[in-house]
Amino acid sequence: MIATPSFTERFSTLAGNYDVVLSDVWGVIHNGVASFPEACEALSRFRAKGGSVVLITNAPRPGAVVVKLLDRLAVPHEAYDAIVSSGDVTRAVMAARPGKAVFHIGPERDLPIFDGLGLSFVPYEAADYVVCTGLAHDEFETPEHYRELLTRIRARGLFMLCGNPDLVVERGDKLVYCAGALADLYGTLGGEVFYAGKPHRPIYDLALERIAALRGRPAPLTRVLAIGDSVRTDLKGASDRRIDCLFVTAGIHAEELGDRHNPNPAALTRIFADAGLMPKAITRRLMW
């Protein structure tokens, strides 16, 4: 078994090896309630030294809408050059299916993802396909609340476009279910699912295209670092693209690892071994 990397206390010790950072958002630079000032400072300092930062998020909203959320959470614009969201990828997939009738599963706050696309929203019985952006009431619902509905949708053989592949996300000090949990359940029922965000390739391709436009040329993957807190999305997505990953432990896996501030090394080794993946480096929280 490959040994788990030792902890890197400061991003500054790694930063010189990279020109580009693809940073996760939720769990790395904020928790849905407040931003993490040290993480924002670390990304700002990386940019000040000539690096480029693209925030890559599974938020099921267009990047422009994510900016407004980050503004409310006091994430400074100096911390990033651009944002690429699963919402951006989702919009591209929907735009390639003009004139189709859509059944939406998700909260009203996700409706901006559909702006300007001219889609028709209908009950599932009349839909051509389904777009899932989350649970309508994620503060108390679970995927099991949707099993009957998804079973009926599956009986119609509808394709599902998943606008957020995350299973759960931190909101303050609790975890809430995301669209990925519903999409995975639909998949177990035999349904066809397209996942728009991490760890799947389309969102990385879009992010790297954005980097090439920003820097005037493509970035060698050896000079790109992904930063994230999820084994399933951030670490796997980076590994699949052969991009190094700095893994943040004080995020979505914090409770699983035993202590948010001092994770259990054996538990950490186990989650990497179970996934068959290993990050380039590990840090508790992103800080310069």
Image (cartoon, rainbow, N blue to C red):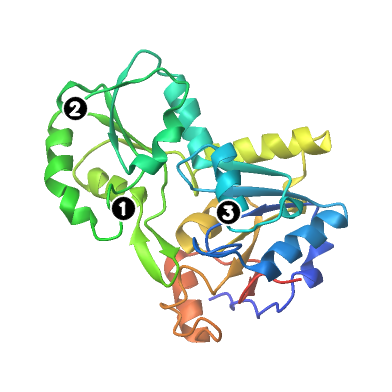
Q: Secondary structure at mark 2?
A: loop
Residue at mark 3: 72
Judge whether 274 appears above or below 214 on screen: below
Query: CA gap, disc 2 to disc 1?
Result: 21 Å
Residue 58's spot in the image, x, y percent? Answer: 49, 48
Q: Residue 108 has which mark?
A: none
Residue at mark 2: 123
- Which residue is found at the position 51% from the left and 70% from the top? 251
Amino acid on which disc 2 is placed: Pro
Drawn side of residue 229 relative to residue 75, left or right: left
Residue depth check, mark 2 versus mark 1: number of the one nearer the observer = 2
Q: Earlier in the sequence, mark 3 or mark 1?
A: 3
Q: Quadrant of the C terminus?
A: bottom right
- Which residue is found at the position 78% from the left and 37% from the top? 214
Query: CA gap, disc 3 to disc 1?
Result: 27 Å
Mark 3 touches mark 1? (CB < 8 Å): no
Judge whether 121 appears above or below 57 on screen: above
Amino acid on which disc 3 is placed: Arg
Residue at mark 1: 181
Judge whether 257 appears above or below 236 on screen: below
Residue 151's spot in the image, x, y percent? Answer: 13, 41
- Looking at the image, the residue that sits furthest to the front is 72
Q: Earlier in the sequence, mark 2 or mark 3?
A: 3
Amino acid on which disc 1 is placed: Ala
Residue 75's spot in the image, x, y percent? Answer: 65, 57
Q: Label 2 crowding class (10 Å Cα cut-off): few <14, some 14-19, many 20+?
A: few
